[in-house]
Amino acid sequence: MSETNVKKESTTLTEQELAIVEKTVEMVKEKLSAESTGHDYFHIMRVRKLAARLAREEGADSYIVELAALLHDIADWKFHEGDLEVGPRVAEEWLQSQGAGKEAIEKVKNIIREVSYKGAGVKTQPPSLEGKVVQDADRLDALGAIGIARTFAYGGRFERPMYDPEQPPVMHQTFEEYKNAKGSTLNHFYEKIFLLKDRLNTDSARALAEERHKYVEDFVERFLLEWEGKM
């Protein structure tokens, strides 16, 4: 992303903050461009754009939101044996190398630690407004047409069946249950995706989620009808 685009989206940032954001964009692109589970560079950019929009509408700190959005999947626990600290640790090392301040680093680390969905029965609402904004942006990207595509990309990567009618969804009550789940891809819609709309933090995100949520509902309904040979 060019400096012009960064400045256009981040008008309240200082020159030093803009430089750190731009370097972070370059690093994320290099690291995640070949990622194939739906947690790639383009996912990061969509979340960043949504988060920037929500930050403006909700009055959140745009610098913290930008950095947390850019780094929220830099070392996802799903690809590191469930380690919830690997993401914050990698983000901290990167931001320290770029000269970011200690307070900003701690805020970003906390958001990365809090942002992920961890099971139907697990409360995951970040305490800070910036955390709420980034979490909402990430969850919005799990909805709609792109959300559907990402869900099947992830399931295929981990060799999960698309659907097994004899395997019911499980509403995981702990993070341990959720991270060890091996259910079908379609079950994931019931175990997570359908629950996201009512777990968003901000009014701005809830307004955006309505149509996306409905699109996913319609898709799953059609999928099941075709599965049964009724359409």
Image (tube, grey):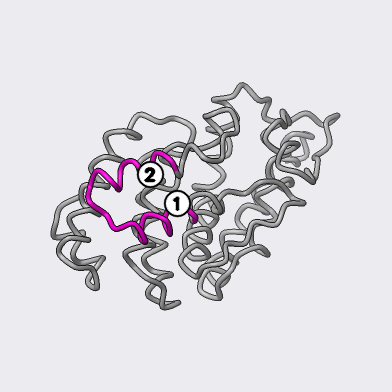
Label 1: state its secondary structure: helix
Mark sitting earlier along the chain (2/1): 2
Label 2: state its secondary structure: helix
The answer for how far apart the CA atoms under marks 2 and 1 are is: 7 Å
**Depth check: 25 or 102 in front?**
102
Task: Name the residue located 71 percent from the left edge and 30 percent from the top edge.
Answer: 180
Give how far across and how far down residue 118 sits, in percent.
66, 46
Say above or below: 227 vs 108. Answer: above
The residue most toward the front is: 102
Residue 196 position by quadrant: bottom right
Type of the residue with mark 1: Lys
Provide the residue designation for mark 2. 91
Task: Name the residue located 59 percent from the left edge and 68 percent from the top edge.
Answer: 201
The numbered mark at residue 109 is: 1
- 59 vs 151, left or right, is left
- Identify the magenta region: 89-110
The numbered mark at residue 57 is: none
Say above or below: 146 vs 64. Answer: above
- 117 vs 60, left or right, is right
Does the CB distance between marks 2 and 1 fall below 8 Å?
Answer: yes
- 15 vs 73, left or right, is left
Say above or below: 194 vs 97. Answer: below
Type of the residue with mark 2: Ala
Task: Name the residue located 14 percent from the left edge and 56 percent from the top edge.
Answer: 3
- 98 vs 58, left or right, is left
Give how far across and how far down residue 119 sits, in percent.
71, 46
Mark 2 nearby-residue class (10 Å; few <14, some 14–19, many ≥20): many
* Quadrant in the picture for the C terminus: top right
